Image: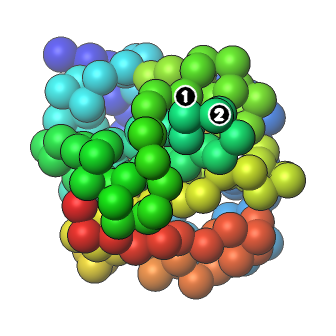
């Protein structure tokens, strides 16, 4: 069993990194309400089950992919228990031969390490290299759970706030695909 703090609706006094700091500043600026917990570092979706129960929503799986030439990058967000068929996704978005992007590319474009990928990392994608692919099932849920840029904390926000406030503010949009 992992350590999980009580739920808070305020930004922490001490953040883990610059991404997390930026997330809470944007939430404040855009009046995005959230619930937040601190937890022991988690790197696998199976470890997030306890966090899901505390927050009352599922932490979403985020997978960082690239095309064969490593010139286009994609952050794919789907339900935790759903497997990703990269061939099917390739067909749906018109990009051939998708594969996992390197840890270096993830750090460069999202400011995150493998095991901590999150839609919040798009804050660091100022040149808009990364395309967000959101599973239709995720887009239709009321709540969205993810980490704020560190796998030592997790948050819950309204999916509508993610799609209509947060993403436009950071000049990103979600391509919604049925996976």
Give the x, y percent position of residue 155: 45, 50
Q: Secondary structure at mark 2?
A: loop
Q: Residue at x 55, y 28 (%)?
A: 101
Q: Residue at 76% across / 29% down in the picture? A: 108
Q: 146 or 155: which is nearer to us?
A: 146
Left or right, 112 with reference to 123: left
Could you tell me if the residues under marks 2 and 1 are in contact, i.e. CB atoms within 8 Å?
Answer: yes
Numbered badge on residue 77: none
Give the x, y percent position of residue 19: 73, 39
Mark 2 sits on what residue? 70
Residue depicted at x 58% and y 20%: 102
Q: What residue is shown with label 1?
A: 101
- Mark 2–mark 1 distance (CA, rounded to whole Å): 8 Å
Which image quarter is the N terminus in?
A: top left
| Residue 98 coordinates in the image, percent (x, y) | 44, 40
Q: Position of residue 111 (x, y in %)?
A: 72, 32
Between 20 and 93, the one nearer to me in the picture: 93
| N-term-proximal mark, 2 vs 1 | 2
Viewer-nearest of discs 2 and 1? 2
């Amino acid at each position: 069993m992992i350590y999980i703090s009580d739920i808070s609706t305020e930004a922490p006094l001490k953040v883990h990194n610059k991404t997390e700091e930026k997330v809470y500043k944007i939430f404040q600026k855009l009046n995005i309400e959230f619930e937040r917990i601190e937890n022991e570092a988690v790197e696998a979706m199976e470890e997030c089950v306890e966090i899901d129960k505390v927050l009352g929503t599922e932490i979403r799986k985020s997978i960082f992919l690239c095309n064969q030439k490593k010139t286009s990058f994609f952050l794919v967000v789907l339900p935790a228990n759903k497997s990703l068929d990269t061939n099917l996704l390739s067909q749906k978005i018109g990009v051939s031969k998708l594969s996992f992007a390197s840890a270096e590319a993830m750090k460069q474009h999202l400011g995150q390490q493998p095991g901590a990928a999150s839609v919040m990392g798009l804050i660091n994608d100022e040149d808009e290299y990364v395309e967000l692919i959101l599973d239709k099932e995720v887009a239709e849920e009321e709540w969205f759970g993810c980490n704020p840029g560190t796998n030592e904390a997790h948050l819950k926000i309204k999916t509508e706030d993610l799609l209509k406030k947060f993403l436009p503010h950071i000049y990103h949009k979600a391509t919604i695909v049925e996976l």
